[in-house]
Every structure is written in structure tokens, then in C-alpha cells.
Image (cartoon, rainbow, N blue to C red):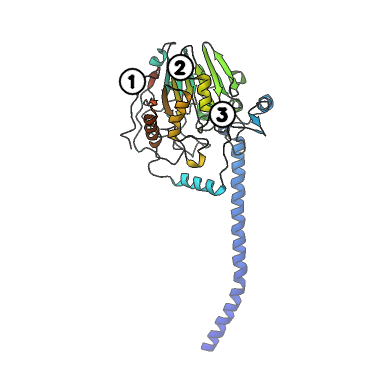
């Protein structure tokens, strides 16, 4: 019996095992097929999203593209920074950055609700034409009033500063978020570039009746969102527009543009100089540290107020976003009497703790003797008065 049983087992083993390699190979091939199918499906979905999603906007074409190609700042098929700017990031570094963003870290977003001041439209309207006023809504969204003209600057009132409405950097908790419904009468919507944390589709579609002044090429996005071409004025670097007694000039910044996978550098980016009869202010938007700050200071300064970015920095992209110490130095280069740090306190777009930008810029401003203006979000500040300047963030977690 043992011999018969042993012979049966050998026969069974010989019968089953020759088929195993083929079965495993077949399943492996099937797995590879499914993985490739998923990759193709994901790639196709990504392509279709960036090609047709309204949030992405559109690329310059026709007469707009011809004007771009005629710009002295457009060479080799793209806009160029004034100074060489390294935008290359190795694949390994890029994957590491994506992983860091995905896993998150403690301190990048506030645990507490950020205190705000309810916007007072009546007080805003009462600002005399002889003065200027600013009101900050977090990150780089502002109201600026000068010579009686109200500018809404880089308004991002949506929930996310992201390519997607359902994923990406989400705004911090505020006591009150600004909205289009709470705005005073706006004369001009002023844009600095087309990145998602400065040009928000959700907000733009609520401002269709406004007048827009933008960098060269950005009007393509606005027209895609049903804003008429007649309402859009586009400017190249160093070009100006006269609005009554106010002269507005578009100046260079060290940055880049693009809202899709393949349109980086296709529209222009920059900063804005406001020159009134007796006052001058500067909105720096996004920029790495650059000799251009000194040039702007020499050409247009001194400024009564400079609003400069101090957040979303990292050594891996230091050429396009200043570190906070450079923000204070840039204020000196611009010959600004007062520095107001912006581009922080609303979105986590870097790996630093959320309060670090203002803490570092405050410390450096003190070392350099730069006068700092740090109002609460929503607070109206007239003539850069430091009456409402306070370290409101100090007790928050």
C-alpha cells in the first residue's frame, strides 16, 4: 500500500507541476496588462483633463500669440527671466518633493483658526484720494486703493490653490474668508501671473463684469472663462498704463508661468509699480531674489510701501521664491520706507512651518532696520500706518 501510495503521489506531482510555470506566467502577463491599461487610462484622463477642464484655462493664440512672439522678453519659444534662472529639477528630486507633499508634516498648517478683521466696505470707500490704502486677505490677495481707484489684486477666494477643485493645497481656517460678495466697488482686477495661487478660476468667473489688467498672454485664460477681450489690457515688462492721475507700470520678476503640463513660460509674469501724485507703492508678487529689485528702486523709488513675498520657499527652488531674509534685503534694494510681507498665512505651498516666513522676515527686518507692516487679515491700512501692525500670529499653533 505504501508503494502504491508513493507511486500515486509521484504521478500527481509530475502531472500538476509542469503546468505551474505556464499558469504563473499567464497570471503575470495578465497583471502586466492590467497595470499598463491603468497607466494608459490615467495618462489619457490626465491629457483630457488638462485639454478640456475649464479650470486650466487656455494657451495664447492668434493675434495674442503674435504679440508675444514680438516681445523682446520672448526667445526660443518662451518668455525668459532677466537673469539666468535654474528651473531644472532631476526626476529623483521631483519624486522626493511629491512624496514630501503627500505625507505632510506637523506645523505646516495652523491648528488654530486664524483671526481676521471683518472687511469694512464703508471705511474703504471713505479713504480720500490723497491717501492710499491696502487690505490683505492672506497669501497674495489684496485690495489696493490709490488716487481713488480700487484694484483687486491676485484674488484667490476659492477653497484650493490647485489644478484640481477636489485636491491640492487647501486654504487655512479663517474666522472669515473674503468673497466676491463682500467686495467694495472694484475698478480694476490686477493680475501678476497665471499660477493657481494667483489666478483662481472660481473667483474669475464671478468677476466677468470687471476690467482686467494682466501680464502679456494671461488674457487667453480670461477669454476662455467668458471675459470679453475688450475688458482685458495686457502689458509687457516696463510698459505702463495711465489711469487718471495714477501711472501703473508692469516690472520684471524672477519667476515663471504655466497652468498645464506643457505651457510653462507661455505667458508673462511680473510685479506692479503704482505711482500716484505724491505716493508710490510696489506689489512684488512672486520672485526669487534678483538685481532687478535694485533696478526698480533706482527707476521708480523710493516707495512708501513694498509688498513682497516671504513664503513657499525651499532651497530646491530658491531662484523663483525668496527666502524671508532676502525679502527684507529686497525692501532695502527697492528703497521702500515700509515692508509688508505677503504670500503666506493661507496655503501650505512649501515644507516650512506656517509661521516661519513671518518670523524669519521679522527678525531680518529688525537686523537691517527695515520698518515692517504686519496687519491682521482683513484690516484696512491707510498710508502704510503701523497703527494696526501687530504680531497677531505669535500665540497661534
Disc 1 crowd, CA 10 A, few/some/many (<14, 14-19, 20+)? few
Going from N to C along the chain, the mark reached first, 3 or 1, is 3
Residue 184 image label? none
Q: Of label 3 and label 2, which has the lower sequence position? A: 2
**SS label for mark 3:** loop
Mark 3 → mark 2, Cα distance in angstroms:
22 Å
Query: Residue 111 lies in what quarter of the image?
Result: top left
* Residue under label 1: 387
Residue at point 36%, 32% (across, down)? 114
- Circle 1 sits in a helix, a strand or a loop, which is it? helix
- Name the spot of residue 71 as percent of width and height, x first: 65, 26
Query: CB of mark 3 within 8 Å of CB of mark 1?
Result: no
| SS type, badge 2 | strand
Quick one: label 2, few (<14), some, or many (20+) residues within 10 Å? Answer: many
Percent coordinates x, y for residue 283 in the rendering: 48, 24
From this view, report whether residue 130 is shown above or below residue 297.
above
Disc 3 target residue: 269
State whether residue 298 appears in this view. yes
Looking at the rendered image, the disc whose residue lies closer to the viewer, 2 or 1, is: 1
Amino acid at each position: 500500500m505504501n508503494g502504491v501510495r508513493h507511486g500515486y503521489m509521484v504521478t500527481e506531482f509530475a502531472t500538476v507541476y509542469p503546468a505551474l510555470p505556464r499558469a504563473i506566467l499567464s497570471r503575470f502577463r495578465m497583471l502586466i496588462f492590467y497595470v499598463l491599461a491603468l497607466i494608459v487610462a490615467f495618462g489619457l484622463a490626465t491629457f483630457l483633463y488638462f485639454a478640456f477642464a475649464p479650470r486650466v484655462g487656455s494657451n495664447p493664440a492668434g493675434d495674442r500669440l503674435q504679440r508675444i512672439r514680438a516681445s523682446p522678453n520672448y526667445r526660443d519659444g518662451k518668455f525668459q527671466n532677466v537673469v539666468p534662472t535654474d528651473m531644472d529639477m532631476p526626476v529623483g528630486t521631483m519624486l522626493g518633493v511629491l512624496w514630501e507633499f503627500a505625507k505632510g508634516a506637523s506645523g505646516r498648517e495652523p491648528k488654530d483658526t486664524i483671526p481676521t478683521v471683518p472687511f469694512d466696505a464703508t471705511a474703504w470707500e471713505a479713504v480720500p484720494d490723497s491717501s492710499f490704502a491696502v487690505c490683505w486677505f492672506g497669501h497674495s490677495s489684496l485690495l489696493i486703493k490709490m488716487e481713488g481707484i480700487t484694484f483687486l489684486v491676485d484674488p484667490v477666494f476659492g477653497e484650493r490653490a490647485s489644478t484640481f477643485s477636489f485636491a491640492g493645497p487647501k486654504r487655512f481656517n479663517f474666522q472669515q474668508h473674503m468673497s466676491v460678495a463682500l467686495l467694495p466697488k472694484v475698478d480694476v482686477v490686477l493680475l501678476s501671473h497665471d499660477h493657481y495661487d494667483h489666478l483662481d478660476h472660481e473667483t474669475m468667473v464671478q468677476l466677468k463684469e470687471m476690467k482686467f489688467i494682466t501680464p502679456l498672454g494671461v488674457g487667453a485664460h480670461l477669454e476662455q472663462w467668458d471675459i470679453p477681450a475688450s475688458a482685458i489690457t495686457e502689458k509687457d515688462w516696463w510698459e505702463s498704463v495711465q489711469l487718471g492721475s495714477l501711472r501703473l507700470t508692469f516690472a520684471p520678476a524672477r519667476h515663471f508661468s504655466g497652468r498645464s503640463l506643457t505651457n510653462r513660460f507661455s505667458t508673462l509674469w511680473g510685479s506692479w509699480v503704482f505711482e500716484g501724485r505724491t505716493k508710490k507703492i510696489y506689489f512684488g508678487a512672486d520672485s526669487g531674489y534678483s538685481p532687478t529689485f535694485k533696478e526698480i528702486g533706482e527707476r521708480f523709488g523710493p516707495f512708501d510701501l513694498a509688498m513682497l513675498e516671504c513664503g513657499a520657499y525651499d532651497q530646491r527652488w530658491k531662484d523663483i521664491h525668496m527666502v524671508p531674509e532676502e525679502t527684507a534685503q529686497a525692501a532695502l534694494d527697492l528703497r521702500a520706507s515700509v515692508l509688508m510681507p505677503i504670500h503666506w498665512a493661507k496655503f501650505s505651498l512649501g515644507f516650512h512651518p506656517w509661521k516661519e516666513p513671518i518670523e524669519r522676515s521679522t527678525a531680518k527686518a529688525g537686523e537691517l532696520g527695515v520698518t515692517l507692516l504686519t496687519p491682521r487679515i482683513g484690516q484696512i491700512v491707510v498710508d502704510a500706518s503701523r497703527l494696526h501692525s501687530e504680531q497677531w500670529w505669535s500665540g497661534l499653533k
